[in-house]
Image: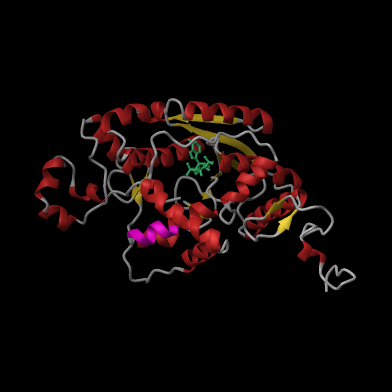
Amino acid sequence: MENGDADGKPKRAAGRLCSICNQKKPALKRPKTLEQICRECFYSVFEEEIHNVIVDNHLFKPGERIAVAASGGKDSTVLAYVLSELNRRHNYGLDLFLLSVDEGITGYRDDSLETVRRNEVQYGLPLKVVSYKDLYGWTMDEIVKTIGLKNNCTFCGVFRRQALDRGAALVRADKLVTGHNADDMAETVLLNILRGDIARLSRCTFITTGEDGPIPRCKPFKYTYEKEIVMYAYFKKLDYFSTECIYSPNAYRGFAREFIKDLERIRPQAILDIIRSGENFRISTSTKMPEQGTCEQCGYISSQKLCKACLLLEGLNRGLPKLGIGRSRGPDRAKKDGKQRTLLSGVKGSDLQSKQCGTLDF
Ligand SMILES: Nc1ncnc2c1ncn2[C@@H]1O[C@H](COP(=O)(O)OP(=O)(O)OP(=O)(O)O)[C@@H](O)[C@H]1O
């Protein structure tokens, strides 16, 4: 029996000492395992789990330039901090820097970018900012004025994905890392099941994606719980921005989020189980998948003639902002749908099948 008292009862049961080091008083109940542990042991398991994920999945090679997609929020702030610590401690030999996208959302992104600018100094990581205005000629404030609140996340998700790739190319990054965490991953698995989106379901749990695209993206927090990220940021007193986007109610994802939180309350392991079931999902080899090519207009990867960003931009610039919105329809369905043809006159049939909103893709 470990650490037995004279009466034979283990000390751990009394809950007086950290269940890892058995020396210090516990400071928290670890959300992932419900163990009572001290602060130092929490830092160490939190950081070492991330290190193990990095090593086991061969995420980086020495000498690589790594862009940390930094929004100023808790996840990417903790990611930038922990990666720079691990890089030093384990000699990864990485050249790290911060990459931020300014979507042009007054009262939200301007404030969070201030946080990233402070992080640049605090962590000694150079920062590059790219903006929607420079890349696309539109800010999100202007887009929302044109299209209203509904569907604005589609524009933002598609544009951000491409903006991060373009920013990473500008600074000659070898890889991009994002702060997507285990909760985000489990939500996305659920959402892709609910939508019946087989293609995305099969790839949304990959730790690295886009190896055939402009730049590979990695998610070192794939198995890291959101609650632990918040605790880590809190105990370490990291400087991050915690306001929600003013344009993003994102109700559908919100339901999945609440459901995951309910499951977590009953059984914390549920988050990892959902990720594992997504990982074990296999598509029949006879299922036809979209072929990847490049956009005729901008040269970005696309399975259609025009990439989704160009299609959305074309709609905005032509005063038809709904042009690229909505789920794609097969050509037969589109042919039968007279209304659709009128709205999309001048746009070729295949454009209707452009990729959907990037928000369900990591
Ligand atoms: N404007 C941005 N600039 C750079 N990276 C971004 C930006 N917005 C999101 N990201 C990247 O995408 C990840 C997921 O973003 P999302 O908005 O879904 O998350 P979040 O959970 O609020 O993350 P965070 O706490 O880091 O803001 C972020 O952790 C970050 O790495």
Q: Is residue 192 magenta?
A: yes
Q: Please give left or right for residue 330 compared with residue 162 in the image.
A: left
Residue 288, given in percent of the width and then of the height, sits at 31, 65
Front residue of this view, candidates 247 and 163:
247
- Residue at left 10%, top 55%? 336
> Toward which corner of the image does residue 232 lie, by quadrant?
top right
| Most common SS among magenta residues | helix
Residue 260, given in percent of the width and then of the height, sits at 48, 57
- Residue at left 55%, top 38%? 73
Front residue of this view, candidates 334 and 272:
272
Give, as a single range, the part of the protein colored magenta.
189-195
> Toward which corner of the image does residue 52 lie, by quadrant?
bottom right
Residue 179, given in percent of the width and then of the height, sits at 55, 45
Quarter holding the N terminus is: bottom right
Q: Is residue 279 above or below residue 218?
A: below
Front residue of this view, candidates 248 and 281:
248
Q: Please give left or right for residue 199 compared with residue 235 in the image.
A: left
Q: Is residue 99 magenta?
A: no
Q: Can I make out residue 254 in this image?
A: yes
Q: Is residue 108 above or below residue 221?
A: above
Q: Please give left or right for residue 238 compared with residue 8 in the image.
A: left
Front residue of this view, candidates 38 and 198:
38
Residue 199, given in percent of the width and then of the height, sits at 37, 60
